[in-house]
Image (cartoon, grey):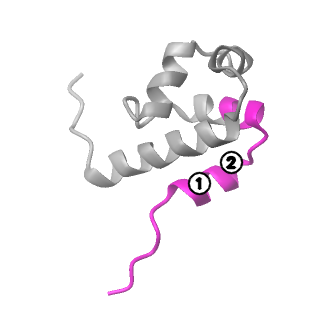
Amino acid sequence: MVRNPLTPEERERGERLGRLLREARGDRSMAAVAAGAGISAETLRKIETGRAPTPAFFTVAALAGVLGLSLDEVVGRCEPAVRVA
């Protein structure tokens, strides 16, 4: 299966998600948060650094749960601001 390249907006959204997760993780270890979400620390590292900008929904939901974030908050903080023309 060939995957289409990500748009600049998708990359930006992935970077915002990574920042949000890093902020929410605080001083908790990456390994502990990843284990709680059922993913590898390397996967979390890739998401936090934007190298995996489009993680699966259930991965994001699991991370949000471990970090005490609502999915509404994740969406609200990761979507681009509405631009007025």
Q: Quadrant of the C terminus?
A: bottom left
Residue 21's place in the image compared with 59, above or below, is below
What x and y, as percent, mark residue 75? 59, 54
* Residue located 49% across and 59% down the image: 79
Could you tell me residue 9's position as x and y percent? 33, 55
Q: Residues within 10 Å of mark 1 (few under 14, many from 20)?
A: few
| Residue at the outermost right position | 68
Say which element carries label 2.
helix
Point out the stretch of residues depicted in magenta: 62-85
> Are dots 2 and 1 in contact, CB under 8 Å?
yes
Whether residue 79 is in magenta: the answer is yes
Q: Secondary structure at mark 1?
A: helix
Marks 2 and 1, how far apart in space? 6 Å
The residue located at (63%, 50%) in the rendering is 74
Q: Which residue is mark 1?
A: 75
Q: Residues within 10 Å of mark 2 (few under 14, many from 20)?
A: some
| 41, 58: nearer the viewer | 41
Task: Say which residue appears at 72% left-offset and 16% top-offset.
Answer: 32
Above or below 52: residue 39:
above
Identify the residue under disc 2.
71
Along the line of sight, the residue nearer the viewer: 70 or 48: 48
In the drawing, does residue 19 fall left or right of residue 13? right
Q: Identify which amino acid the numbered label 1 is placed on.
A: Val
- Which quadrant: the N terminus? top left
Tell me which amino acid carries mark 2: Leu
Residue 39 against residue 53 in the figure, above or below: above
